[in-house]
């Protein structure tokens, strides 16, 4: 493995000039990092607000798809390479349907996942709302949610027939997914998660 030099971030020596395959070999399972055409970006530690939203997503989406055997959810650290020529990203949350399980590799998803969620932090705002938005759209990820935990707001985007994201609004505080069969959620569940048994009753699963 050859590099064009290295730098330090959070006490980690970061090589430069790696291919995506070399990056995956270098990546430790305890390190959250992204590969942008040879440059490695180590992710900042998650805040408590970030973790609370991630916990809600894991319980809500994870619980639903497990109960209905629709696929699997993946949390960091697990990389995503949505398409050729695109960066390797480390999304905050992903869902891969049963029919796309063949895209899974040992340490990354080779191709678009069905759903990606990014939870915005102050340092990730531009990356999540502009860079990743464009990449996920180009990579053909059918559904992209952008969650703002501090303002307690969420935007939902779905690919239209032209392959461009369009925003889909929650109606009366309820959002209905296109990629997860019959799945819906109340957006306030992301901030104040009720007992999962209460949610399952609303879904008709209990």
Image (cartoon, rainbow, N blue to C red):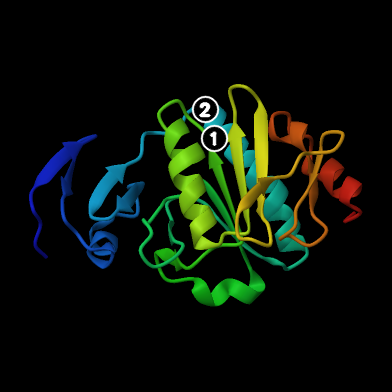
For the point 39% across and 33% down, which residue is it?
45
Report x, y in % for residue 198: 86, 41
Mark 2 burial class by Cα count in 10 Å: few <14, some 14-19, many 20+ = few
Q: Position of residue 142 (x, y in %)?
A: 63, 59
Residue 137 in the image: state x and y as whole percent.
54, 54
Q: 81 left or right of 147?
A: left
Q: Which residue is mark 1?
A: 51
Which corner quadrant holds the N terminus? bottom left
Q: Left or right: where does residue 80 sit relative to residue 3? A: right
Examine the rendered structure and indicate whether residue 96 appears above or below residue 49: below
Above-or-below relation of 66 to 203 = below
Does any portion of residue 46 appear in the rendered image?
A: no
Above or below: residue 31 compared with residue 110: above
Q: Nearer the viewer, residue 187 or 198?
A: 187
Q: Is residue 45 left or right of residue 178?
A: left
Q: Position of residue 36 (x, y in %)?
A: 31, 51
Q: Quadrant of the C terminus?
A: bottom right
- Contact between marks 2 and 1 (CB within 8 A): the answer is yes
Q: Secondary structure at mark 2?
A: helix
Query: Label 1's element?
Result: helix
- Quarter holding residue 168: top right
Task: Kindly report the distance in space between the C-alpha atoms of the residues bearing marks 2 and 1.
Answer: 5 Å
Is residue 148 placed above or below 41 in the rendered structure?
above
Which residue is depicted at the point 66% across and 34% down? 154
> Looking at this view, is 102 or 55 the one in front?
102
Which residue occupies 91% across, 54% down?
204
**Residue, x 59% and y 28% (percent of image)?**
149
Q: Quadrant of residue 55?
A: top right
For disc 2, the marked residue is 48
Q: Is residue 8 left or right of residue 180?
A: left
Q: Which mark is residue 29?
A: none
Check the image and name the residue furthest to the top. 151
């Amino acid at each position: 493995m050859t590099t064009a030099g290295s730098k330090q971030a959070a006490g980690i020596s970061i090589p430069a000039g790696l291919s995506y395959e070399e990056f995956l070999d270098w990546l430790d399972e305890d390190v959250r990092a992204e590969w942008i055409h040879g440059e490695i970006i180590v992710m900042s530690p998650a805040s408590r607000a970030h973790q609370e939203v991630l916990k809600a997503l894991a319980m809500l989406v994870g619980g639903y798809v497990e109960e209905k055997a629709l696929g699997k959810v993946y949390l960091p650290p697990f990389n995503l390479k949505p398409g050729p020529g695109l960066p390797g990203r480390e999304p905050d949350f992903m869902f891969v349907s049963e029919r796309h399980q063949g895209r899974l590799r040992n340490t990354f998803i080779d191709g678009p996942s069905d759903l990606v969620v990014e939870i915005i932090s102050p340092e990730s705002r531009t990356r999540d709302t502009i860079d990743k938005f464009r990449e996920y759209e180009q990579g053909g990820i059918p559904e992209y949610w952008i969650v703002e935990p501090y303002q307690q707001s969420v935007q939902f985007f779905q690919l239209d027939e032209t392959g461009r994201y369009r925003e889909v609004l929650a109606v009366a505080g309820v959002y209905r997914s296109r990629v997860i069969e019959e799945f819906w959620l109340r957006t306030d569940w992301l901030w104040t998660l009720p007992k999962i048994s209460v949610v399952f009753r609303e879904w008709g699963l209990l």
